[in-house]
């Protein structure tokens, strides 16, 4: 079976969040279970040239906005699967990956170019696997093409929802500019008087998936459907939840090249050394008996930063450290900065994006805070589990599917989990965690339970294969 995965970001070529981790790892995992997969993603200014192994095509002519645009295509296997990177400097050589007024135009172009590329490669895939709103355009274009172009007649689309909160909404007048002005296309995009790329992908793709089982139900309710829950409910029989995997080649405390001491389930000594180095790096006094609470995240409301703000004082009062890595909304950045100024001996803050530091924090911290408002899957709680860093999470989306609340009596569970979006509930779990940390054996049990969980991509890849096979038969 041939599968083309299309995504706006993919590790190691580009990454702003979990989508990059997933899109980079899935094609490799698919190959390992026998699927002939390839990946198509943009070539950004941020894409390191060492990953652009060779030029695959230097004249991909893209008919666009009434003209013709000559794009280049690079080839690489740096993520472990054949990858084609579409190089269109006007659209993708910018200071950041997202955040421009014309993002919808940038990704509409990318989708159109990706389909032209698949035609040029010459063997139509059985499945085109699209990810998030950035790929809604291709769902519609492919479905339109299928009506008249026999090349696409056996190609089906799978659309994965990684985050329903971002929908790629724009003015309908642009649909003409993108070659999507037919009645069929307009109807697919139309959503409350505007065009929505997420809506188009949801409506037109042959099947749908979300990145955890629980999230597949959550987006059917108004609270998490962001205005499209009616459509998800309508298409629920074509929807399945598949929890993301972890790329244990990248996130493995036994071999991780980003950390200075290694450790495993059987020998956690290296973790203590990682903790010492982490405290030192943030110029914090080295007291290895106090726990470190960590957070690594985009600083947006989704991640429950306001709950962290409300409990931070109590954590400090209990004598623990807090380390935060992240950037995003100014108010949240300012909060962490002020907290550090207020308690410079207990708080370490790094504002920005830093891949190496993310690994060092996972390795050196004791607890990982993820009190998200909603969380389609979440990857950091799974990285934490493998690094013996105990997650404290809210029971939503993938956090609920991967974290089991600790039962101290029976020694079962891999973390701490609370239901209501409330600072009090979060705080209760923080106290429970501090209490458990105080007993070395209990803590070791918790760490072991998490470290022995198997969240590898192999399981997830097999479920995707089943999804693809079902989709082909439809
Ligand atoms: P989301 O995709 O919603 O941001 P996930 O938990 O799925 O959430 O994935 C986030 C990914 O981005 C993880 O790999 C995490 O380590 C990484 N990440 C987030 N913020 C930073 C940062 N400031 N520096 C380094 N890595 C980060
Ligand atoms: C989104 C979600 C996150 C998920 C990631 C990868 O960014 O916010 O929960 O893990 O996609 O699927």
Image (tube, rainbow, N blue to C red):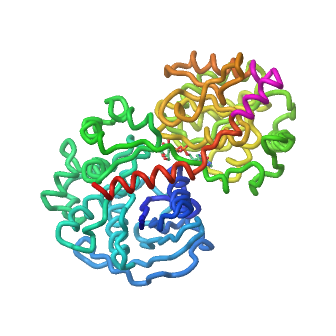
Classify residue 430 by image quadrant. top right
Q: In this rendering, would 184 be left or right of 42?
A: left
Indicate the quadrant where residue 449 lies.
top right
Q: Report whether 21 appears left or right of 117.
A: right
x%, y% of residue 202?
Answer: 29, 48
The residue closer to the viewer here, 132 or 156, is: 156
Identity of the residue furthest to the left in this view: 183
Quarter the N terminus occupies: bottom left
Q: Is 285 left, or right, of 162 in this rendering?
A: right
Residue drawn at x 16%, y 61% as measured from the top left: 181
Asked whether residue 253 is drawn in magenta, I would say no
Q: Residue at x 70, y 22 (%)?
A: 433
Q: Report the label total.
A: 0
- Is residue 439 found inside the magenta-colored segment of the image? yes
Image quarter where the C terminus lies is: bottom left
Q: Position of residue 151 (x, y in %)?
A: 27, 74
Residue at left 20%, top 54%?
A: 172
Magenta region's main secondary structure?
A: helix
State the image coordinates of residue 352 (x, y, percent, origin top left): 62, 48
Q: Is residue 184 above or below residue 422?
A: below
In front: 386, or 434? 386
Q: Is residue 322 visible from the viewing direction of this image?
A: no
Residue extent of the magenta highlight: 435-449
Query: Residue 40: x percent and y percent?
Result: 44, 67
Judge whether residue 151 can be spotted in this image: yes
Judging depth in this view, the residue of 304 and 399 nearest the camera is 399
């Amino acid at each position: 079976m041939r599968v083309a995965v299309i995504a706006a970001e993919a590790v190691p070529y580009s990454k702003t969040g979990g989508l990059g981790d997933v899109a980079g790892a899935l094609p490799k995992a698919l190959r390992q279970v026998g699927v002939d997969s390839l990946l198509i993603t943009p070539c950004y200014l941020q894409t390191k040239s060492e990953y652009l192994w060779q030029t695959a095509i230097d004249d991909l002519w893209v008919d666009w906005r009434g003209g013709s645009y000559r794009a280049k295509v690079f080839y690489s296997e740096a993520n472990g699967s054949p990858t084609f990177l579409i190089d269109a400097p006007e659209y993708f050589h910018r200071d950041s990956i997202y955040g421009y007024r014309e993002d919808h135009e940038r990704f509409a172009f990318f989708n159109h170019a990706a389909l032209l590329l698949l035609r040029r490669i010459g063997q139509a895939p059985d499945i085109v696997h699209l990810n998030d709103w950035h790929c809604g355009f291709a769902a519609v274009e492919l479905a339109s093409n299928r009506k008249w172009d026999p090349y696409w007649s056996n190609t089906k689309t799978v659309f994965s929802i990684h985050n329903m909160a971002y929908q790629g909404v724009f003015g309908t007048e642009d649909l003409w500019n993108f070659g999507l002005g037919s009645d069929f296309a307009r109807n697919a995009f139309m959503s409350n008087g505007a065009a929505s790329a997420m809506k188009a992908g949801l409506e037109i793709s042959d099947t749908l998936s979300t990145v955890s089982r629980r999230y597949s139900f959550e987006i059917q309710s108004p609270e998490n459907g962001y205005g499209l829950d009616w459509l998800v409910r309508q298409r629920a029989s074509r929807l399945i939840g598949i929890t993301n995997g972890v790329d244990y080649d990248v996130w493995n405390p036994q071999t991780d090249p980003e950390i200075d001491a290694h450790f495993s389930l059987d020998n956690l000594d290296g973790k203590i050394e990682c903790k010492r180095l982490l405290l030192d790096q943030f110029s914090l006094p080295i007291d290895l008996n106090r726990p470190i609470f960590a957070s690594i995240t985009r600083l947006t409301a989704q991640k429950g930063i306001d709950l962290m703000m409300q409990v931070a004082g109590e954590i400090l009062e209990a004598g623990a450290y807090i380390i935060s890595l992240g950037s995003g909304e100014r108010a949240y950045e300012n909060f962490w900065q002020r907290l550090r100024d207020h308690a410079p001996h207990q708080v370490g803050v790094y504002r920005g994006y830093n891949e190496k530091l993310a690994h060092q924090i996972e390795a050196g911290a004791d607890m990982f805070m993820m009190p998200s408002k909603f969380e389609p899957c979440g990857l950091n709680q799974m990285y934490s589990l493998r690094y013996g860093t105990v997650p404290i999470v809210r029971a939503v989306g993938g956090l609920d599917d991967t974290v089991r609340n600790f039962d101290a009596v029976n020694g079962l569970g891999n973390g701490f989990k609370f239901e209501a979006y409330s600072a009090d509930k979060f705080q209760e779990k923080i106290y429970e965690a501090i209490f458990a940390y105080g007993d070395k054996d209990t803590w070791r049990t918790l760490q072991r339970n998490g470290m022995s969980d198997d969240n590898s991509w192999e399981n997830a890849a097999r479920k995707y294969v089943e999804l693809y096979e079902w989709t082909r038969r439809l």
